[in-house]
Every structure is written in C-alpha cells, then in structure tokens.
Amino acid sequence: MSPIIIALLAGLASVFNFHIGNGGLRVSLGIIVLIVALYKYEKLNVLKTSLLSGIAVFVVRIILDYAGTGSVDETVLYHALEIIFYLVYGFLFDLMVRKDTSVYKSPLILVLMLCDFGANAAEYLARFLFLQSAIVPVDFQTVFLAAFIRSAVIWVIIHFVFKLDESKHAFTK
C-alpha cells in the first residue's frame, strides 16, 4: 500500500468526525485510518505516511471550510497545526509499537492511548505557542476520553476486522 493512498484515505475519512467537550477536540476517522494502515502494512514508512496524512487532513479541512464559509483566512494555521498531531502520533507509534522489542508486550490499547495522548499534548503545545488567542482550555478527562475512543476503535478494527495478533504487535522480527 502506498503512503499517498493511505494519506488520501485518511484525508477523506477525516470528514467524518465528532467533537468532544467544549474545547474543540474532535475524534476523526482520519487518524484511525492512518494507524490501522500503519499496523497492517509494516513496510509503510511511518513518518512519511504520517506527514502525508496530516497534510491531506489539513487540505480536506481547508476545502471544507472554504466550501462552508467562502474564506479560510482564520483557519489555515489552526488546521495546519493538526499536522503536528499526525506526525507525533506516527513517531510515537513507530517508537512504542513497531520498535518495541520487549518480551512482555503492553496491551495495544494502552500503548495507542499513550500515543494519542502524547500527540494531543504536542498539538496543544503548538497551539499555545502559535495561536495564543485561539487557545480553549481542554480538560484532562476530555483528552483522555478522545484518546480512549480512538484507541478502542483502532483496537476493534485490528482485532475483529483484520484479525491481527496483538501479542506480536505484527512487527516482531
């Protein structure tokens, strides 16, 4: 599978999302498509695929904003920072899942939640640094709930749709 195809699928899937809490945090199918693909296709370059997926999600959101309002002036940087979420999630996934050589594996759903939480923290930090006026407080429970929902959906797809063996993390060499 090509990183470009995964990126296009993630971008299109990102159209389907819902917001959690009052802080603008959304659960998008885009990241779910990316992580399931990275798990299933171990030969995919994680950082390249994550970067391309983040860019695709950014482009799709800009197109939707423009279609809805006729303008994107105020949302370009806001959506561009979502690329950081995709990159950091991909990096953490590579580090914690693909390169995990430990004998005793942590449960995949917990590792995915850590990846998600770390990616959200990085994106939030970037928003704080670049968009101080646009920061909306997000509480820990909301970030945790979003991480849990995304991770649970990924876990269900990996186990029940693709029937992959979590104990091997699909990457034992």
Image (tube, rainbow, N blue to C red):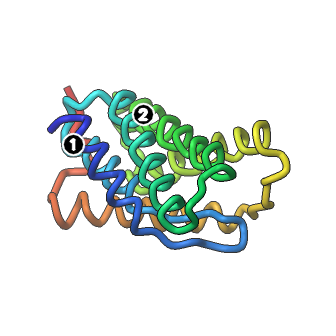
Q: At numbered mark 1, what does the secondary structure look like: helix, strand or loop?
A: helix
Q: At 38% across and 42% down in the image, what residue appears?
A: 53
In the rendered image, residue 76, in percent from the top left (x then y), is placed at 61, 46
Q: Where on the picture, by quarter, is residue 26?
A: bottom right
Q: At 71% across and 66% down in the image, what residue appears?
A: 23
Residue at mark 1? 5
Of mark 1 and mark 2, the one earlier in the sequence is 1
In the rendered image, residue 107, in percent from the top left (x then y), is placed at 40, 52
Q: CA distance from mark 1 to mark 2?
A: 13 Å
Q: At numbered mark 2, what does the secondary structure look like: helix, strand or loop?
A: helix
- Residue type at mark 1 is Ile
* Residue 85 vs residue 116, the one in the foreground: 85
Image quarter where the N terminus lies is: top left
Asked if 114 appears above or below 145 in the picture, the reply is above
Residue at mark 2? 51
In the rendered image, residue 4, in percent from the top left (x then y), is placed at 25, 37
**What label sits on residue 28 in the rendered view?**
none
Name the side, left or right, on which 13 lies relative to 165: right
Graded by Cα atoms within 10 Å as few (under 14), some (14 to 19) or many (20 or more), the crowding at tag 1 reads few
- Residue type at mark 2 is Leu
Graded by Cα atoms within 10 Å as few (under 14), some (14 to 19) or many (20 or more), the crowding at tag 2 reads many
